[in-house]
Image: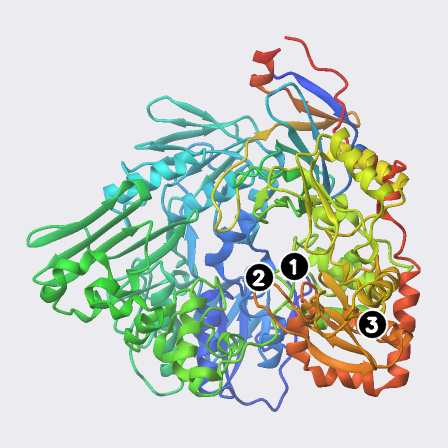
Amino acid sequence: MTDWIDIGTLADIPQRGARTVHIGGPKEIAVFRTGDDQIFALVNECPHKKGPLSQGIVHGHSVACPLHNWNIALKSGEAQGEDKGCTPTIAVKQEDGRIWIAQPEMAKVAA
Amino acid sequence: MEFQGGSSPVTKSGDDIGVPMDDVREHLVVVGNGMAGCRAVEELLARDPARYRVTIFGAEPHVNYNRIMLSPVLAGEKTFQDIIINDRAWYDDHGITLITSDPVSAIDRARKTVTSLSGRTIGYDRLLIATGSDPFIIPVPGKDLPGVISFRDMKDVDAMLDAANRGGDAVVIGGGLLGLEAAHGLTLRGMKVTVLHIMPTLMERQLDEAAAWLLKSALEGRGQTILTGADTAEIYGNGKVEGVRLKDGREIPASLVVMAVGIRPSVALARDAGLDVGRGIKVDDHMVTSDAAILAVGECVEHDGNVYGLVAPLWDMCRSLADGLTDQHSGYKGSVTSTKLKVAGLDVFSAGDFSGGEGCEDIVLRDASRGIYKRVVVKDDKVVGAVLYGDTADGGWYFELLKRGDNVADIRDLLIFGQAFASGGGALDPKAAVAALSDDAEICGCNGVSKGQVVACIEKGACSLDAVRAGCKASASCGSCTGLVENILALTLGDEVQSGPKTMCKCTSFSHDDVRREIVAQDMRSIPEVMQKLHWSTPDGCSSCRPALNYYLLCALPGVYVDDQQSRFVNERMHANIQKDGTYSVVPRMWGGLTNPRELRAIADVVEKYDAPMVKVTGGQRLDIFGIRKEDLPAVWADLNAAGMVSGHAYGKSLRTVKTCVGSEWCRFGTQDSTGLGVKTERMTWGSWMPHKFKIAVSGCPRNCAEATIKDFGIVCVDSGYELHVGGNGGIHVRVTDLLCKVATEQEALDYCAAFTQLYREEARYLERTAPWIERVGIDYVKQRIVEDDAGREALRARFLFSQQFMQDDPWAERAAGVHSDLHRPLSPISIAAE
């Protein structure tokens, strides 16, 4: 059973941008809004050197890490092109004008 | 030339469409607008461009595209635009009539006409059938349910992308190349994918068991579920796909099923017309069918008992076909094939016979921790087969040894280590390795171009990579052979290789200079407008082009253009420098390197209050406070603002610092007030955005303590005035400035500085420092614009000062006052659900 947490509205996140959120797990989560107003969530760490992905440039459905410009697919968390690595994704949904994020198992255990 | 869309048939029964009455050339009608059909026409045009009038029928609505590149489109690495082989202009330029979305449905051999699905009937003198293959659909219950698709054309890719957007589970039936590519793309697009393969190992036609196992583990490592020996019994679902049931009773739920179990030559049209058909349409060595007026080429044909499903044989066939059509009969002799593939980003190569057997000896190298497996099969001292996984660099070499039948007894000990070792050192140099390749070694697998053809193209005058791409198509598709082509260029031309202007990034075919010119010429006012008008191939650019466009617009439209924060690199968006641990460093401006107790106290207080772990004096004569958290930045800035300090822009593609020495006020050698001039210069230039960072220094005498001769703009004071230096750099490539000129007064020094800065802002490419810019345009050009053209200099200076009116607001002050405070704060969840 997934527990969903209300983290705000689309307008709270800049288009082609991101905000961070803490939902009780050990890691900070980055919530992205793309140019076509889709929402994605990843652990806020690049698989390369843990750069804060929330601070990267969002283009298409990818984000370029601010530290070394690795491009990470927002949907899968996979590094793209020649780079290899994967950042964990977190389920998000838009419903009733709000953004909901799935509470991770880790957070539940901690709670 | 005209295009006939499928929706508006222009039919004159039994006659040709849109043909000038006086065109008496033979009419070649091509059935199939795919890779084989168009390649055949290209080969024909290369031999005799005027001989035939050409009409091409295509079942799809598109121009000719590279079908083997559909996987990168699915994976999101390329767009459809990127995989077009021949655009509309190509059909236009060669007077080819293209009829899209209208497959040919019947051939009347007696009347020499074809009839299309929409009812067009047109006559032919020669007919070329290039219908390719159809995906094989396994006859199980549920195969026609909505949500079951194949992976063959752009329509299928669109259907998969649609499904992926809705998310959920996908099943791919077929663990061959196509199936694995589909699975990879869908995984990248966020679906949970299960691959069902009926055989015990993946890609059994290309890989032996060991390589297949490595591949399987790698794919599983990426989150795919791979079921081998999985025999599909049924696709179930009520009105749409809900899952797949296996013969052993297992059920795998799925909202999308991709059937990729294989392809069959598309022969129905030919069979209905009464042509000889076996597994494919039977052709002779000149690709002529059992009807002398009808030819066939590509995956739909059977030649000498063989049917090919790879691209390389297709190129061979097209050459023989074109030779035949122009009466230079060469004859196709069949193809020996090798497969060099990237499966889901993993390198795989196989060639020849690797099934083993009597007299075959295996040489194997395994390096499981690096994921490398190599196996070369030798029989009677000759290479008869090879399988490579993980490192396929030597694939081409093994394939050559195999094709030539070389005796490898002498190099057998080193064979498995590859060409570099086996041919004795030297070839570790990539150029030497390329030099050692024979003329018929294949360079570009996508377009079937041999080394000999690349060399011929270069010798005909192609002196750059782009020219080679345009001339013989080598490296024009997936680009994986670009390095090889560059080495061939270097070998063939020596130092004469030209590097043309590079495109801005992969999102556009325009160069930086083109884009800038068009922004001004077409008065474009926003990033989306530029992308729209200049046909960007991505929805909203990438991390390379967006910051560049933002700068170009900002520079072209001071006071008008609204800066796009999301197109700025993090440092310029956060007005601080991101560090490797994700914290920021903060550098307040210290005009000309001067400071006072109040500023120093404020900095000391910030360091203590926010627990900054380090303070450092920078190379630009100011203080850098390290380890500030994103959340604390606005408060830090408020404290620094309170002491009168503003942003030092130490993070920007902008004016950084003006470094000074103490000058005539204190120094016994000083000739002028270098400190005072430095402060004035910094007051004039601070806040201006530039193509790249920009540093200024003012030295009070030729001893040059402020190191002005390695700055972008340097002033060296002398007794009689001020020497102005430009284009210096102290980075990786140290470059000493060029002397621009000497002026007599402080005001002139400031005016020239403003004019030079504006020239750089307006004409250098984004991320080009002044040093490479001046090396590109030449110091004489800069002198001509700044020193020799008084009116021009004055205009540049005026534009700079006008622009500066809008630039000199301290970005820290507005952030400290609360603007964009959301960028510094995390979201606040409404509730954390209880257990």
Query: Of label 2 and label 3, which has the lower sequence position?
Result: 2
Q: Do the residues labelled 1 and 2 touch (CB within 8 Å)?
A: yes
The reply to the same-chain question for discs 1 and 3 is: yes
Q: Determine whether B324 is above or below B434 in the image.
A: below
Q: Position of residue B224 (x, y in %)?
A: 44, 34
Q: Which amino acid does label 3 sit on?
A: Cys
| In front of the other: B580 or B277 | B580
The quarter of the displayed image where residue B189 is located: top right
Q: How far apart are marks 2 and 3 (CA)?
A: 44 Å
How far across and down, in percent of the image, does residue B574 sit?
A: 75, 43
For the residues labelled 1 and 3, the Cα–Cα distance comes to 39 Å
Q: Quick one: label 2, few (<14), some, or many (20+) residues within 10 Å?
A: many
Name the secondary structure under disc 3.
Answer: helix
Identify which residue, B727 or B353, lies in the foreground.
B727
Q: Which amino acid does label 1 sit on?
A: Ser
* Residue bearing mark 3: B753
Distance of label 1 from label 2 (alpha carbons) = 8 Å
The first of marks 1 and 2 along the sequence is 2
* Residue ID at (46%, 77%): B472
